[in-house]
Amino acid sequence: MTEAPDPLDRPPIENWRRRALVSLSYPSFRFFWLSNLVVALGLMVQFTARSWLIVQLTDSALILGLIEGLFAVTLAGGAIPMGLAADRLNRRNLLLLDNVVALIAAAAIGVLVVTDLIAIWHMVVASLLGGLLFAIRMPTSQAMTARLVPDAHLMNATSLNSASHSLPNVIGPAIGGVLVGGVGIGIAYFATTGAYLVALAMLALGVAASFGAVERVEHRSVTADLREAWTYLLQNKDLLKITAAMLTPFVLGQSYVLLLPLFVDQELGRGAATFGALSASLGVGGVVGAMAVATFGQRRQIGYVMLFGAVAVGIGALVYGTSQSPLFTGFALVIAGAGESSVFAAFQTYLLIRVPDAMRGRVMGLTFTMAGFFPVSAIVAGALADLYGLRAVAIVEGFLILALAAVAWRVVLRQIVNDHSLDLSAT
């Protein structure tokens, strides 16, 4: 197996630019990161087209939230078995398979749209399949990251991973909005298929299969593997607590964002171009948050990063709910995006530090099962928005996020700040 170079063999990091991008100096991680970036760019074009397509097929917030929420059904149900597969099979090959299936699915929806055969039930099936593919990608990709960079650069690598998903939010929705308004929704789906082809080539040619191999001491049954992972979590309750701390801003923050196309249409009275631009604002915030953590974040600051990130998401929700213009709505989404990406980067770093490599797929699968229910909140938010309005939902969620962030600080985040084992200088 090819190991990542020892960071001690490299020149010292002298400035913030090098600190921000240090993980990209390792070739395998660089190709891995670029592959994820291209996939995310294609997906953001697709997501923009999908949301606008659903709005064209139906004007109900409940149906929009329901279709988005169905994503959680297969994500939550598939995270554990896919995490198990990530600990038993080659992780890099699993990601290649995931990309192939996603490519075929995007092409199929594109054909249905351009032939005018698309229907709501097609979007339901696509959402269910998308959740399953996400269940494969998330634990597998995150578990593999620790094999591509030295331990000292884990926080930088996980932050850059977050940036690779946030950066496409800046231009992907804008491109999607232009494509939808200019040449049609079907073309936006076809653009995604091209992105998957490029990503497949990068991953296959730039990342050796040895990086995806998992070293197992002994071969156990599926039941024994799952029991081992669950026992590990029960014996390390701090992992469950920090997962709960991550879920609050992520679940509640995403629920009102998933209803953004209706907010743009009904509250702001704008069209697809404005929707794309506002979705890009969320990406700008995500990049800012991720790169701030990548540049200045340290492992011993994980608790602070998660607290400040959660507070930012809550404030963003309050500004969003009271905004009367696209400008202030975009500002709110920048704040929320920065908070979400920083929370997620810190959470992923903590998991990679704490969990042994041979168990990362299963443990991350279990935690992503809990995280996978975030689109379900869109169903509830959609129903409440139909009754009380989109603004009221965002404001209430903002106050809830702030209150639960304070609880998370008292229960677990303050303890993590005082955990000296997270400081490399202490080891």
Image (cartoon, rainbow, N blue to C red):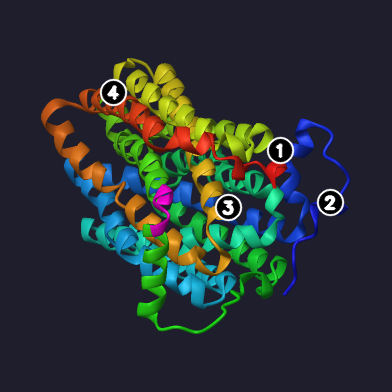
Mark toward the start of the polypeptide (3 vs 2): 2
What residue would you read off at disc 3? Answer: 353
Mark toward the start of the polypeptide (3 vs 1): 1
Instruction: Residue 266: tell me if it is visible.
Output: yes
Pointer 3 local density, CA inside 10 Å: few below 14, some 14–19, many at least 20:
some
Mark toward the start of the polypeptide (2 vs 1): 2
What residue would you read off at disc 2? Answer: 8
Q: Secondary structure at mark 2?
A: helix
Mark toward the start of the polypeptide (1 vs 4): 1
Tell me which amino acid carries mark 1.
Ala
Q: Secondary structure at mark 3?
A: helix
Front tag of 3 and 4: 3
Taking depth in this image into account, of 188 and 376 the one nearest to the observer is: 376
- Spatial CA distance of label 3 from label 2 is 19 Å
Q: Which residues are drawn in magenta?
A: 235-239
Horizontal side, residue 146 vs residue 410: left or right: right
